[in-house]
Image: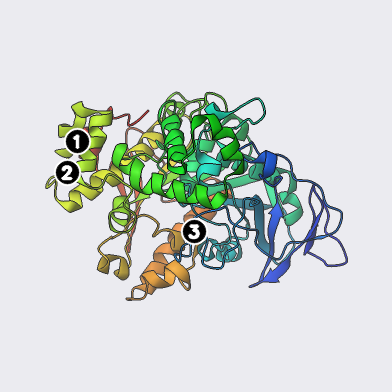
């Protein structure tokens, strides 16, 4: 790897060719670099292939297209003017303006329930991380929805085969690109920390159980993961059949249809499946999610962690205190209502229903029902990962309790996604600005500084902080981020004991 003298610090050699970036807001940035071949044509619904080399210098000053998805105004996905295309496998790098190497590398996986999200989203601007932490920041697009997280293998023909876990495989390809190329941007390929929120954190806990991801990252920081969100066999095949039914495609013509049908129609049908059908038929699941296929993802992540087969990298894992409130108010896809909760237990563990619900005094009132749904999907499996992984590698657990004034006005409290502006330090724009419209910005910024500082210390030293004890199954020490931070032992002990033995849909 070398930096050309024609344009110092901006033109970098990668394994595929030269890329030229720009200086933005005091950092060097490169955008839209292909890390794999376009997953189009014959490569649609197939594992990612290497990107082709180029001869001219690639203009890396513009973000690549986001994966096809429903547009949003949240600042977390494809906005009204965001380009979208199936040819979406590009990566972005942000580095300090001053050339020095090697620096710790932070690789972010965006969230969005595996159906939305974009590396170009303003919420994921890594400038503040780079400036404060003296790190190299990486974020990429990966395939979403039916094109990235559904299992169509049963519809393969000799002429047209389909692979599975494509979105995860894209992430592995991006991490391989980092290993090959990040030194040229000033990063240390031997010190890569992956971090992500929601589906990005689910990706992280899944990748810790993917054999082909071994050695590609060295630390993991998972915000609001739902580690149980991986399925197979049974549910993925059912959902694939349901999607084809929504598309009006029969099994005989499925291979040809999946090869040709416009991405927009797949997005629309996936939206109907994930928002309307799956939450009612199988509450607490995602119809688009990693698939336990016996090969790429050999074991369910919770089973891999339990048996010590996950990659033994240090892990920080935690949740918002009221994960389910966002979904009950704005994204009605979780089991946050009594009828869905009771159907979830009927489908998974009817013998535990009374015991679990008794641990939420006041149930079936709304507040308690929302907490049951959030705990089932996010908190409980994260605790199960922490206790299992702590037997094999260092683990730190946290709970994020701080809710800005606007979040309290909206009645959601410290709910899912509110830690995004905290970890990126982006309270001056987008979601961060909205959350502080009603005041409390100085406190929000202070909490965010401590949370972001923990991530940066973890990336640099392998520990999130000197006053944050590690987690083990005896003490269950957890750091609580709030206006005043606390260290607590075994938070929600009664709930944890009530859920003991719950295995969900696996």
Tag count: 3
Residue 405 location, quadrant = bottom left
Q: Relative to the observer, which residue lies in front, 499 or 504? A: 504
- The mark that comes first in sequence, 2 or 3, is 2
The residue tagged with tag 1: helix, strand or loop? helix
Q: Is residue 297 visible?
A: no
Q: How is the image coloured?
A: rainbow
Looking at the rendered structure, the secondary structure element under dot 3 is helix
Task: Using the numbered discs, state the Cα–Cα distance from disc 1 to disc 2 in whole angstroms.
Answer: 7 Å
Can you identify the residue that label 3 sits on? 453
Q: Going by the image, does 82 lie left or right of 31?
A: left
Residue bearing mark 2: 360
Secondary structure at badge 2 equals loop
Question: Nearer the viewer's eye, disc 3 or disc 1?
Answer: 1
Marks 3 and 1, how far apart at CA: 36 Å
Q: Are marks 1 and 2 in contact (CB under 8 Å)?
A: yes
Mark drawn on residue 477: none
**19, 316: nearer the viewer:** 19
- Callout 2 environment at 10 Å: few (<14), some (14 to 19), or many (20+)? some
Q: Quadrant of residue 228?
A: top left
Residue 356, label in figure: 1
* Residue 419 visible from this viewpoint: yes
Q: Quadrant of the C terminus?
A: top left
Where is residue 163 shown, x and y percent of the image?
59, 32
Q: Answer left or right for 273 relative to 342.
A: right
Q: CA distance from mark 2 to mark 3?
A: 34 Å
| Eye-nearest disc, 2 or 3 | 2
Above-or-below relation of 250 to 36 = above
């Amino acid at each position: 790897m070398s930096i050309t003298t024609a344009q110092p610090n901006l033109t970098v050699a990668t394994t595929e060719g030269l890329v030229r970036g720009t200086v933005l807001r005091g950092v060097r940035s490169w955008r839209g670099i292909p890390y794999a071949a376009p997953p189009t044509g014959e490569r649609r619904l197939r594992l990612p292939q290497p990107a082709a080399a180029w001869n001219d210098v690639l203009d890396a000053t513009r973000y690549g297209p986001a994966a096809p998805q429903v547009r949003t105004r949240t600042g977390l996905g494809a906005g009204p003017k965001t380009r979208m295309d199936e040819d979406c496998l590009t990566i972005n790098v942000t580095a300090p303006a001053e050339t020095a190497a090697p620096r710790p590398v932070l690789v972010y996986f965006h969230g969005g329930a595996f159906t939305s999200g974009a590396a170009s989203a303003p919420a994921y601007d890594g400038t503040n991380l780079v400036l404060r932490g003296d790190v190299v920041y990486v974020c990429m697009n990966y395939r979403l929805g039916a094109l990235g997280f559904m299992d169509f293998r049963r519809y393969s023909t000799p002429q047209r085969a389909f692979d599975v876990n494509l979105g995860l495989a894209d992430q592995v390809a991006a991490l391989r690109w980092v290993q090959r190329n990040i030194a040229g941007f000033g990063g240390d390929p031997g010190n890569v920390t992956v971090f992500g929120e929601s589906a990005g954190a689910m990706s992280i806990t899944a990748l810790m159980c993917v054999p082909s991801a071994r050695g590609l990252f060295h630390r993991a920081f998972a915000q609001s993961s739902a580690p149980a969100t991986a399925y197979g066999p049974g549910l993925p095949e059912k959902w694939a059949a349901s999607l084809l039914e929504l598309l009006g495609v029969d099994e005989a013509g499925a291979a040809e249809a999946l090869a040709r049908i416009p991405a927009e129609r797949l997005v629309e049908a996936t939206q109907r499946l994930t928002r309307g059908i799956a939450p009612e038929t199988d509450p607490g699941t995602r119809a688009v999610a990693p698939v336990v296929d016996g090969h790429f993802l050999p074991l369910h992540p919770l089973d891999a962690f339990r048996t010590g087969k996950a990659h033994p990298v240090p892990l920080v894992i935690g949740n918002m205190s009221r994960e389910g409130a966002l979904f009950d108010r704005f994204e009605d896809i979780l089991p946050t209502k009594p009828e869905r909760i009771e159907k979830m237990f009927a489908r998974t563990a009817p013998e535990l229903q009374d015991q679990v619900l008794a641990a939420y005094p006041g149930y079936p009132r709304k507040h308690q029902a929302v907490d049951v749904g959030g705990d089932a999907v996010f908190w409980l499996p994260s605790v199960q990962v922490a206790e299992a992984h702590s037997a094999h590698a260092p683990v730190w657990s946290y709970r994020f309790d701080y809710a800005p004034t606007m979040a309290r006005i909206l009645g959601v409290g410290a709910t899912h996604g509110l830690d995004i502006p905290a970890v990126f330090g982006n309270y001056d724009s987008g979601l961060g600005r909205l959350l502080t419209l009603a005041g409390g910005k100085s406190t929000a910024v202070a909490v965010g500084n401590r949370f972001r500082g923990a991530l940066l210390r973890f990336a640099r030293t392998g520990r999130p902080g000197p006053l944050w004890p590690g987690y083990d199954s005896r003490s269950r020490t957890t750091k609580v981020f709030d206006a005043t931070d606390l260290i607590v032992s075994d938070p929600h002990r009664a709930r944890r004991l009530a859920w003991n033995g719950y295995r969900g849909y696996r």
